[in-house]
Image (cartoon, helix red, strand yellow):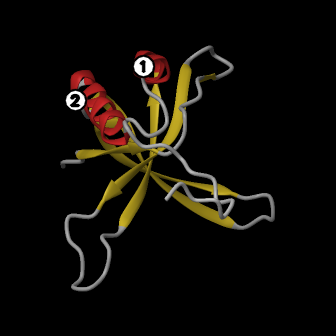
Amino acid sequence: MLNCAVILGRLTADPELKHTPNENAVTSFSVAVNRSYAKAGEERQVDFIDVVAWRNTAEFICKYFSKGQAIAVQGAIQTRTYTDSKGNKRKAVEIVAEKVNFGERKQDKEETAASNHRRNEGFEEILCDDDLPF
């Protein structure tokens, strides 16, 4: 049998490190992943994939990743059932992360930020008070 999942997307929130009663580190987070296709005349859809990471992987993610940052996750798909507060049976599907990597180089991220800053240089906000300078 084979159960392997690999995704590349952006974190939807800052990951938060928690510990089980046995002191195992764990974090759960969601990754926004663009679909590889778009219907004609429509915008590309985004899937939000739930991920859980344990121990050293969880600690690494919480230390080095934040909301909006690109992350590559390799792991296995896991399903579990639970009963919600109203007594309804629910099913959760998530990826259990085995390996994670940065989805973009730090240099690329810094260059993009610098490029955006340069693009906005030389512009000044003019408040609308009907007294335009021309």
Q: Amino acid at mark 1?
A: Tyr
* Residue 93 on image: x %, y %: 45, 55
Classed neighbour count for the residue bearing mark 1: other residues with Cα under 10 Å, few (<14), some (14–19), many (≥20): few
Q: For this rendering, which residue is in front, 113 or 89?
A: 113
Left or right placement of residue 83 versus residue 103 in this view: right
**Outermost residue toward the front in this view:** 134
Residue at image position (33%, 54%) is 33
- The kind of secondary structure element at disc 2 is helix
Q: Position of residue 124 (x, y in %)?
A: 49, 43
Q: Residue at x 46, y 23 (%)?
A: 58
Q: Is residue 123 above or below residue 44?
A: above
Which comes sooner in the sequence, label 2 or label 1? Answer: 1
Q: Is residue 52 left or right of residue 128?
A: left
Image location of residue 59, percent across then percent down: 48, 17
Determine which of the numbered discs, if any, sits on residue 64 in the image: 1
Instruction: Please give the label number shown on residue 127.
Output: none
Rendered position, 42 above or below 120: below
The correct choice, above or below, for 45 with respect to 69 in the image is: below
Q: Secondary structure at mark 1?
A: helix
Choose mark 2 or mark 1, whichever is in front. Answer: 2
User: Circle 2 sits on which residue?
Assistant: 108
* Relative image position of residue 85 (x, y in whole percent): 80, 58
User: Could you tell me if residue 47 is visible in this image?
Assistant: yes
Q: Residue at x 38, y 44 (%)?
A: 10
Quadrant hosting residue 120: top left
Which residue is nearer to you in this view: 40 or 15?
A: 40
Relative side of 129 to 117, left or right: right
What number of labels is visible?
2
